[in-house]
Amino acid sequence: MSTPVPARANAPERYYNYAYLDEQTKRMIRRSILKALAIPGYQVPFGSREMPVPYGWGTGGIQLTAAIIGPDDVYKCIDQGADDTTNAVSIRRFFANVADVATTEDTGEATIIQTRHRIPEKPLKEGQVLVYQVPQPEPLRGLEARETETRAMHAYEEYGLQYVSLYENVSAYGRIAATAGYPVMVEERYLMSPSPIPKFDNPKMAQNEAVMLFGAGREKRIYAVPPFTRVRSLDFEDYPFETQTWEETCALCGAKDSYLDEVILDDAGDKMFVCSDSHHCAERRASGHVGPMAGHTLDQDAALKEPAQ
Amino acid sequence: MNAIPGRIAPAPLLSVEGLTKWYGHVLGCRDVAFDLRPGEVLGIVGESGSGKTTLLNCISGKLTPTSGEVRFDTRRFGLTDIYGLSEPDRRRMQREEWGFVHQNPRDGLRMRVSGGANVAEPLMNLGGRHYGNMRQATIDWLDRVELDTRRIDDKPRNFSGGMQQRIQVARNLIHGPRLVFMDEPTGGLDVSVQARLLDLLRELVRDLGLAVIIVTHDMAVARLMADRLMVMKGGEVVETGLTDQVLDDPQHPYTQLLVSSVLQI
């Protein structure tokens, strides 16, 4: 399933600055990663480099991946759960090009999975690394603009302020309506923003077998959740944490327990729900699961001919 | 203080000694000393630039003094120098036992969250994790500061200046502090709103038995609120005494000038 990259004639030279970043930079990032793993949830500052993509497109995640990737790795990149979106395709191609690694869409086969907005549905295994692209590493930033103050709050474990945002949610919507980037406590010590993953994925972070690394390129922070770490989503005693649920099933594979995206089909209001994790959905269909709207094949020739007339 | 025979004076809640603050070669305040007992309201008066706010910031732990001691009767450590505590201990003590009412409500409130959340925040900072209970306490306090409880979820910017100040008062009293600092609490308000807020503050202070240090340049506010006055000029305390005594029979020439400059209508 994975796509190996053919051997190149100038292989020895390519390893001088393997995986885009120079050796000193990768060393600096690896040190920050080690510190982040030693203090789960703590935001380690690092000298973020300029990358060949704009801030907000995953510069933090790309730097993390570049620092840990090796020629034997199998690389997967997802955006909103899907392997085939523009950003995911270009980042995957980037690493296939600069690091000569095999790439894959198979969650089970990958050793490094770079992600934005999702944790794959298939449980991660020991030996896998999940790299998150993080826009804003500071969960308290929306309430407290001063970095000096938020640093003190982390240092002294003063996390009452985060509950103010939950309080606002309950008073406005009658429930904790926050859905993405839902704050978590790591090992009951550090408050952490899990990057904009849906809160549906929050429980998957707890006691996970894989290494989870978070990189924020613009904000110049790295943090991590090592394997088998306690991760608890914040809540009130009378408003416990809940994940999203759907009444619908996936229109293609019929999955009842996966995170669904709503897709508008036409102007008449028709819509379908499909798994956001494209590999999970494809794998289920391959093993014979059929959703209510499955079985339509797109007549591509007809679609291409039509505008010509 | 003059102890009445047969009555034991309560231990001071706050004890300030030799407090001096230099900003480089510019004097903030020099050699200030006083004791504050539980339930006592101390007014600090003086003209602009006399060191009132410097003194208040030094006492309330916001500004490290050049020399001198500020001892507070903390629940956890007893009477200790607040600048001798570690930073987390000091911050915790400030959260648990103090309140600070700013002149401008924008400094004391979070303008991006609702009035109700502003009032409830100290409870969450002290470990409150039950929404229903905190909501009820917030409603009770909004009622107590005479605000419309139906407006609990409005943002502070949608309240008038006087109402914002009431929200700030509720926010600083909800967690049951023992000492509240007030920096010109009625500064930016018109006279009628000012009078109502002062009335409310006086009532709350008496009901809760709070100790208050109030900084003001308004002699009327000092007269209404304070038990005792400290008059400052050029960074030094020139006169102290009971409020009525200082205002009715000022001894120091500067105090005499200050009292006689109050406009009469």
Image (tube, coloured by chain):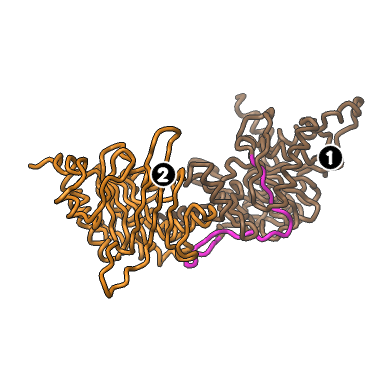
Residue under disc 1 on the same chain as residue under disc 2: no
Which chain hosts label 2? B
Tell me where residue B251 appears, x and y as whole percent.
19, 47
Judging by the rendered image, the residue that carries numbered circle 1 is: A70
Label annotation for residue B20: 2
Is disc 2 surrounded by few (<14), some (14 to 19) or many (20+) residues within 10 Å?
many
Relative to A148, does residue A164 appear above or below in the rendering?
below
Q: Main secondary structure of the magenta part?
A: loop
Q: What range of the chain is rendered magenta?
A: A221-242
State the brown chain.
A
Does residue B48 appear in the picture of this structure?
yes
Does residue A256 appear in the picture of this structure?
no
Q: Nearer the viewer, residue A248 or A41?
A: A41
Picture quadrant of residue A203: bottom right
Q: Nearer the viewer, residue A255 or B70?
A: B70
Tell me where residue B168 appears, x and y as whole percent.
33, 52
Q: Is residue A298 left or right of residue A156?
A: right
Identified by mark 2, the residue type is Thr
Is disc 1 surrounded by few (<14), some (14 to 19) or many (20+) residues within 10 Å?
some
State the orange chain.
B
